[in-house]
Image: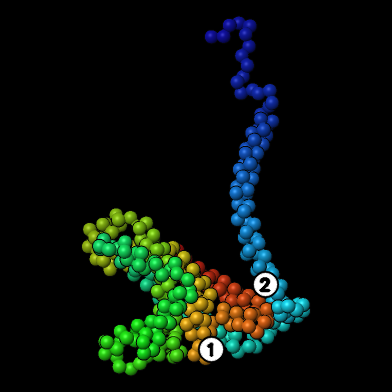
Amino acid sequence: MVEPGVTVKNVDQNPLGPKKLNRLTAFMANKKKLSLNVFAWLFLLPYLLFYVWFMLFPITKGFIVSLHEWTIGNDRTFIGLGNYQMMFKDAFFWEALGNTVFFVVISTPTLVVTGIILALIVNSRLRGTTFLRSSFFLPHILSISVISSIWVFVLQPYTGFLNSILHKLGVSEEIFWLDSTNLAWVSILMATIWWTVGFNMVLFLAGLQEIPDDYYEAARIDGANSWHCFLYITLPSLKGVILLVVVLQSIASFKLFGQSYLMTNGGPGTSTRTLVQYIYETGFISNQMGLASAMSYILFLVMIVFAVIQFKFLSKKE
């Protein structure tokens, strides 16, 4: 109870006033947010410097070079879109681009399906799965020169490991794996699978281990078999991982160079010469750096188009 003559001050009153108080609160909140943003950008700054210097600057510089006629050691001459016109009239460019797209088409599905199969094997409760994981992933840490040397030894005629196995199985005909166009592509594909499928397996394995076991238990209670579980639980749950692997594998296949260059040197003839190899030969053997830069930008655009198409068709929500 309040005594007579004593006034009670409203607790909601503030000497600053409600408007000034709201402004002060908003200022302090913005100041705190700004300080957090500054610290975040300071932590990102080293990466951004590397990204600008080693990614954005070379991309911009390469486009500038593609607009010039330039050989190493000489001055550059601006020719506008002359290199692009010359490139589109070059039959070898279209052949190399066709070979690259062909390899992307045959390698991407094969590597995705093989990666899923290997991930299912190593994710099972069978004995020795730890050893299998290491064995499947081990080739991925080797360099492309080592991988190519191993497969040239395996595929060489008469004394090659693969032909020796086939002879013992009753195949009398000598197979020249690297001297036939179709078999050369098969050889490059086998080497690529052995080298890179372990990485895809790890990605799919991570996706498999994220699927709750409750889904499978509920499906088995309802009478679903292993195929139904795979078709209606595993594949839909791996949709995001499949999209990631397909995009990464397509980009890697577009950049095919080491296997074809070291195993077949683009042969027989030019039947396995990829666009990256043709860019290398144009730039560093023919010394036409401007034309090579133009080809690189066309390859970059083709890869973007493929990636956009894959995201559009594989990321649809049902």
Viewed as shown, does residue 189 lie left or right of 279? left
Residue 163: give its label. Answer: none
Q: Earlier in the sequence, mark 1 or mark 2?
A: 2
Viewed as shown, does residue 168 lie left or right of 95? left
Residues under numbered marks 1 and 2 in contact, where contact means CB atoms less than 8 Å apart: no
Instruction: Determine the image quadrant of residue 209.
Output: bottom left
To which residue does mark 1 refer?
270
The residue positioned 44% from the left and 75% from the top of the image is 147
The residue positioned 24% from the left and 60% from the top of the image is 220
Q: How crowded is mark 2: few (under 14 residues within 10 Å), some or many (20 or more)?
A: some
- Residue 221 location (% of width, % of height): 22, 58
To which residue does mark 2 refer?
62
Nearest to the observer: residue 273 or residue 149: 149
- Residue 180 location (% of width, % of height): 44, 91
Q: In this view, does 297 lie above or below 226?
A: below
Amino acid at circle 2 = Gly
Nearest to the observer: residue 207 or residue 157: 157
Amino acid at circle 1 = Thr
The residue positioned 44% from the left and 63% from the top of the image is 240
The residue positioned 52% from the left and 72% from the top of the image is 251
Instruction: Determine the image quadrant of residue 293.
Output: bottom right
